Amino acid sequence: NRAEVVINGSSSPAVVDRSNESIKHIKPASFRWRHNQTLSLKIRKQILKFLDAEKDISVLKGTLKPGDVIHYVFDRDSTMNVSQNLYELLPRTSPLKGKHFRTCAIVGNSGILLNSGCGREIDAHSFVIRCNLAPVQDYAWDVGMKTDLVTMNPSVIQRAFEDLVNETWREKLLQHLHSLNGSILWIPAFMAKGGKERVEWVNELILKHRVNVRTAYPSLRLLHAVRGYWLTNKVHIKRPTTGLLMYTLATRFCNRIYLYGFWPFPRDQNQNPVKYHYYDSLKYGYTSQASPHTMPLEFKALKTLHQEGALKLTVGECD
Ligand code: CTP
């Protein structure tokens, strides 16, 4: 009783359905998804006109020095200074330099993952990307454990680690960072004002405790480039979500891309409630940095790509 996104309606992302119901229309089992290699390569080429994941995944050491002033991407009037710690943690070369993977999983954080049993399938991919330090240990059967790259919006430190108010929370974050064990920690430090202290706390912990992670801080041009690519494909997103950013970057180094945990709707196809996140009690429409997101619109675009075989979206149980 595997459920996959159905092939129906227009294949053009330009046509936007107003109702979420038609966006999330899915059907069970029999439909066989087939990878469209030609289309995947075409998309990679098109995206390369806007950005290059190898370069834009992180600012490199050679390009900044401590004390440099940076204007936030979304808050141009506000600035930050490059701290010594941030400088220390900038990679010398791209963490994705020359990388190529047969299959990649991008794991979104929707509650649709609960009871999916997708953990084993996710872990079998060559490269696994996760978002916003999502916990895995207690959810391994549904989400897997393997993590090659994980993102961390500064707001997560507030949301999931109580802004490190005491030693207990600091320890919790530290344990989580240690568990990453050599993977890439991707921190959008230059996007929006307000996250500077949180980024600094994390940087400090990493250096002080010699945490084994490879830090990356996306380039200043990445967000606009990603937005530009989708705009030219008539997907009008104000601010791409982490999940869409990851898909856009992954096209550069992954042959086949599999998406899990992408379901921005409070109910599943059978009208059963679906949690916003698989691991916490956050509600749909919560106001934070997520508010400028237009997840259902992104979902529609991803669904179209699924139908065309450019990526595979799993929104039900795995075998
Ligand atoms: N996602 C989804 N449906 C949900 C929740 C998340 O499709 N119900 C996808 C989105 O692509 C999202 C990603 O999973 O970007 C990771 O989820 P989350 O941590 O909530 O990311 P953002 O909302 O982008 O992060 P933030 O709230 O920090 O801006």
Image (cartoon, rainbow, N blue to C red):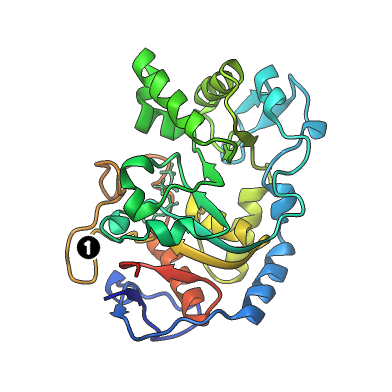
In this image, 178 relative to 43: left or right?
left
Instruction: Give residue 61's quadrant in the image.
Output: top right
Image quarter in which the C terminus is found: bottom left
Residue at the limit of the structure toward the top, as seen here:
167
Whole-percent x, y for residue 128 in the image? 53, 53
Query: Would you call the spot at circle 1 few (<14 residues within 10 Å), some (14-19), or many (20 or more)?
Result: some
Residue 166 visible in the snapshot: no
**Residue 102 in picture, x, y percent from top left:** 63, 65
**Left or right, residue 160 beside residue 202:** left
Between 244 and 40, the one nearer to me in the picture: 40
The N terminus - image quarter = bottom left
Query: In the image, what residue occupies the spot 48% across and 33% down?
Result: 179
Q: Secondary structure at mark 1?
A: loop
Which residue carries the number 1 mark? 267
Q: Which residue is at 51% across, 36% downward?
A: 180
Percent x, y for residue 196? 55, 25
Q: Is residue 271 left or right of residue 33?
A: left
